[in-house]
Amino acid sequence: MMDKLVPWRKRTVRQAPEWDEHPFDLLHREINELFDSYYRGVGRMGRRTIGSAGFELSETDDEIRVKVELPGMDEKDVQVAVEEDVLTIRGERKEEQASGKRNYHVSEIRYGGFVRSIPLPAEVDAEKAKARFTRGLLTLTLPKTGAAREGRRRIPVSEGR
């Protein structure tokens, strides 16, 4: 009779997959995730860096175009290089040194260096490459080599039975 007066039902506990792990394995994984999230944006001397720059890569028959977002940076702070089939962009946003002592309450602006390597889908002629930097947007135009242009052949598709 006492069972009928109790206003709750006996709950069944679903066991999540991580509960099957050994407690030390679970602790190890959580500590790794903690350090990964902290160090993901940390540069030299513990400063947070600007992280990886967002980019857009497009291709035509004659060229590859890459646009990279670099807000708050100047063209003098950016270096671009092509080695084999990899485009490498390096940059650094330097912290402005204000005169006088300033007490910051919050600062989410990231400073420091970054490197972004982008594999290119075709061989390019680095000697004829052009770079334009306008309002924080770096636009690279990389002409394909003759071999890369000739290597791509379109195959006509016809209706078949």
Image: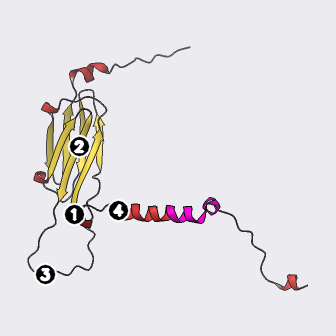
* Residue 11 at least partly seen: yes
Q: CA distance from mark 4 to mark 2?
A: 22 Å
Return the mark for residue 101: 3
Q: Considering only order in the chain, which callout, 2 or 4, is on the residue closer to the N terminus?
A: 4
Q: Quadrant of the C terminus?
A: top right
Tell me the kind of residue under disc 2.
Answer: Thr
Q: Is residue 31 above or below residue 157?
A: below
Displayed quadrant of residue 153: top left
Q: Position of residue 91 (x, y in %)?
A: 19, 53
Q: Residue at x 26, y 37 (%)?
A: 86
Q: Is residue 16 left or right of residue 114?
A: right
Q: Is residue 64 above or below residue 1?
A: above
Could you classify mark 3 by the number of other residues whose Cα lies within 10 Å: few (under 14), some (14-19), or many (20 or more)? few
Q: CA distance from mark 1 to mark 4?
A: 14 Å
Q: Is residue 108 above or below residue 137?
A: below
| Disc 4 target residue | 39
What secondary structure predominates along the stretch shown in magenta? helix
Q: Which residues are magenta?
A: 13-29
| Disc 2 target residue | 88
* Scheme of image coloration: secondary structure
Q: Considering only order in the chain, which callout, 3 or 4, is on the residue closer to the N terminus?
A: 4
- Disc 4 versus disc 3: nearer the observer: 4
| Disc 1 target residue | 111
Give SS at disc 3: loop
Q: CA distance from mark 1 to mark 2?
A: 19 Å
Q: Per the image, is 133 magenta?
A: no
Tell me the kind of residue under disc 1.
Answer: Tyr
Return the mark for residue 151: none
